[in-house]
Every structure is written in C-alpha cells, then in structure tokens.
Image (cartoon, rainbow, N blue to C red):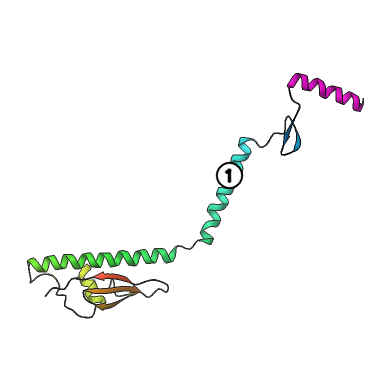
Amino acid sequence: MRLTASQIEAIKQEAEKFHGVAQVRLFGRRVGVNQRGFTLVELIMVIVILGILAATALPKFVDLSNDAKQAALTGLAGAVSSGGTINFAVRSLRPASGVQVTAATCTIGLMQDMVDASTSAVLATGYAAGGTAPSCTLNTTAAGLTAANVSLPLIN
C-alpha cells in the first residue's frame, strides 16, 4: 500500500501533536527529530583518533635534539663552575689540596680537574675549552650550539 502526499501530511501533523515539534531548524536547514547532531561517543572517538595521530606525527615534525644538547652543555658548564668554586674553597682552607688556577688559558684538562682529577677522559672527547681563567667557555663539536660560560675562580 502506497501513501499519498495528503496522507503523509496528516501523519506528520499527528506526530507534531504527539511529539511536540517534528522538525527542528539547524543552521537554516530542516533537521528531523532523530538528526540533531553527533553523539557523545562519536565526538570522543574523533578526539581519540586525532590524539593518536598527533602523538605519532608530532615527533616527526619537532626535533628537540639541539635543545637537549644545549641543555647538556649548559649543565656540564654548571658542574665545572661548581667544581671550580669548591676547588677555591678547598684550596683556601688547605693550600696543599685542590688545583691551582691562575690567569691562564682555559683547557679541557683544567676543567676536568675541577670535576674529577682522577681521570682525564671524561671531558676530553667532543668538547673544546676557550677563554682565560676566570672567564672560560665550554663548547662542543656539535654544530649549532652556543658556548656555555664557565667561571673558574683564580687561586694560587
């Protein structure tokens, strides 16, 4: 059995009386009662998929290796400066202990002595020293990094 246009219109009018409003306007278009938008589950699934895509794609576009190398260089320079300060305090109390630091050209060996005088291989590879004590610089052979300042107090 096929309904005519007048029968369909009558059914719609009865539905409006029973359900209130049979159609809603959304962005200027007519939308049926069962078509009011996305469900919460659909929205959450889209957000999850976008999050997974962002988490997998972001590392390909963001390279933080230079920032990490610069932070490591700055941290090492801070350790050498702290070692120089401790060396100054030790040598001030006991002149026979510690390392003598004079106004001389800064070397990797001098900086190594501020951190650990028992071995000389830790700072020797991949780093370069510059300047004159007490204001030295520590740099690395990696391109694109800024030299870090090292303060080595002078003490005889």
Picture residue at 61% right of the left edge, 44% below the top: 46
Which residue does the image show at 74% across and 25% down from the upper left? 21
Between 131 and 115, the residue placed more toward the observer is 131
Kindly give the residue lying farthest to the front in the view shown: 28
Residue 43 placement: quadrant:
top right
Q: Secondary structure at mark 1?
A: helix
Q: Residue furthest bottom?
A: 105
Residue 2 image offset from top left, x and y in percent: 92, 27
The image quarter containing residue 88 is: bottom left
Drawn side of residue 28 relative to residue 112, left or right: right
Spot occupied by residue 119 in the image (x, y as percentages of width and height): 23, 71
Which residue sits at x=37%, y=71%? 146
Would you say residue 116 is visible in this rendering?
no
At 9% from the left and 68% from the top, the residue drawn is 92
**Where is residue 27 shown, x and y percent of the image?**
71, 39
Q: Is residue 29 shown above or below 8?
A: below
Instruction: Say whether residue 131 is left or right of residue 91.
Output: right
Of 86 and 133, the residue lying toward us: 133
In the image, the segment drawn in magenta is: 2-20
Q: As rendered, which of 15 and 40 lies closer to the eye?
A: 15
User: Which quadrant does the N terminus fall into?
Assistant: top right
Q: Is residue 11 magenta?
A: yes
Name the residue type under label 1.
Ile
Q: Quadrant of the C terminus?
A: bottom left
Q: Is residue 54 left or right of residue 81?
A: right
Task: Report the front residue among 79 and 117.
Answer: 79
Q: Measured from the top left, where is residue 83 in percent x and y?
A: 20, 66
Residue 27: in magenta span: no
Q: Residues within 10 Å of mark 1 (few under 14, many from 20)?
A: few
Q: Which residue has dot 1 on it?
A: 47
Left or right of 15 in this view: 112? left
